[in-house]
Image: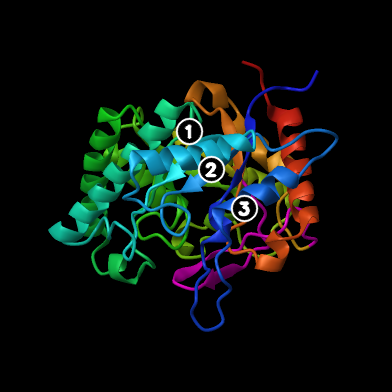
Amino acid sequence: MPHSLPKLHNAMWPGLVGKGDGEGQEPPISLERMLELTAAASVNGQKFEGIDYFLFLPHTDPQASNEELNKIADLIASHGFSVGSVVAPVWPGTVGDSAMGDAAARAKFLDAVKVACRIAGEFNKHGVRKYGVIRIDSAEFGVAKWEEDPKANTAKIIETFKEAAKIAADHGERLAAEGEICWAGMHSWKDMLDLLEGVGMPETLGFQADMAHTYLYLMGYNAPEHALLQPGYSEAEFYAAYEVMTDKLRPWTIDFHIAQNDGTVHGAGSHDKTGRHCQADDPTGKLDIVKCAGYWLKDAPARGIQHICWDGCMFPNAVLENVNTWNTILDVMIKVREAHGWDA
């Protein structure tokens, strides 16, 4: 009998991240179209069961009225989907600003968390959302500025995250900080762990693990001093290092992205270079997705995880528009659930 959990979600933000109207950029893909593409996927009768969602334009006006938000919720539910985790618009140019910036910037960051809590609350009241977290990061692209004074800048991020966690707790929400090499103070497994422990509020602020990004944690891409692997590693060396990293970060992990990575970095538009998300069956992919997912999903129910999400951030539009892309992704996610899932 197949497992019923974790629920299988697709992310909507690949239609937005790295897209735009600048030179060389592809246009965004609408929420409506991303939902259609997700709903069209099917593997032996199994469909995606929900979506994770970015709370900013053009998919969502962060200042949308409750009536407008309920229309969006109706649209999502009309495809048979639940909403899981939502992404707070914490970055400069959206609602927020750097978590290690000046007082005004950090106030904007907290405003973005408040916006996310309000929208998540409306989706909860509607009934389309019953689980999931609010995702954040330091909203400081690159590590150069952080490196000018790592101790002081990490302390600023910790203080901002503590205030954000208090806001989330007041709304009955949890925050997950996304581990990714492009976010200052979160750009290596060790710096991420230091940040989580510095905040010290595991009941409210945890870690969001993405398989593509955490692979580059192993390689120490933006923090060579924290590398757990060197190029040319053996399979045995890889899994020994993977176990070290996941043992450190898994206790904090409350949100999880299935993804593939070929060991390179990639950027598009305003998004700094970070771990490249590859297609699930990419022959250059470095990860055995199903096996590696098991390291993160061990004891997942105890951490409140009820769904997993595929992240195909910065896929070209032609890839996103191809139904075979989504069937292949859904197939590997089903295999992850078969190998590591559980029942309610």
The residue pinned by badge 3 equals: 34
Outermost residue toward the bottom? Answer: 23
> Element under label 2?
strand
The type of residue carrying mark 2 is: Asp
- The answer to the question of whether label 2 and label 1 lie on touching residues, with beta carbons closer than 8 A, is yes
The type of residue carrying mark 1 is: Gly
Residue 85 visible in image: no
Q: Residue at x 31, y 64 (%)?
A: 92
**Which residues lie in the magenta part?**
258-283
- The answer to the question of whether label 2 and label 3 lie on touching residues, with beta carbons closer than 8 A, is no
Spatial CA distance of label 3 from label 1 is 20 Å
Look at the image and say whether residue 278 sits in the magenta stretch: yes
The residue pinned by badge 1 equals: 132
> Element under label 1?
loop
Which of the numbered marks, if any, corresponds to residue 52? 2
The type of residue carrying mark 3 is: Met
Alpha-carbon neighbours of circle 2 within 10 Å: few (<14), some, or many (≥20)? many
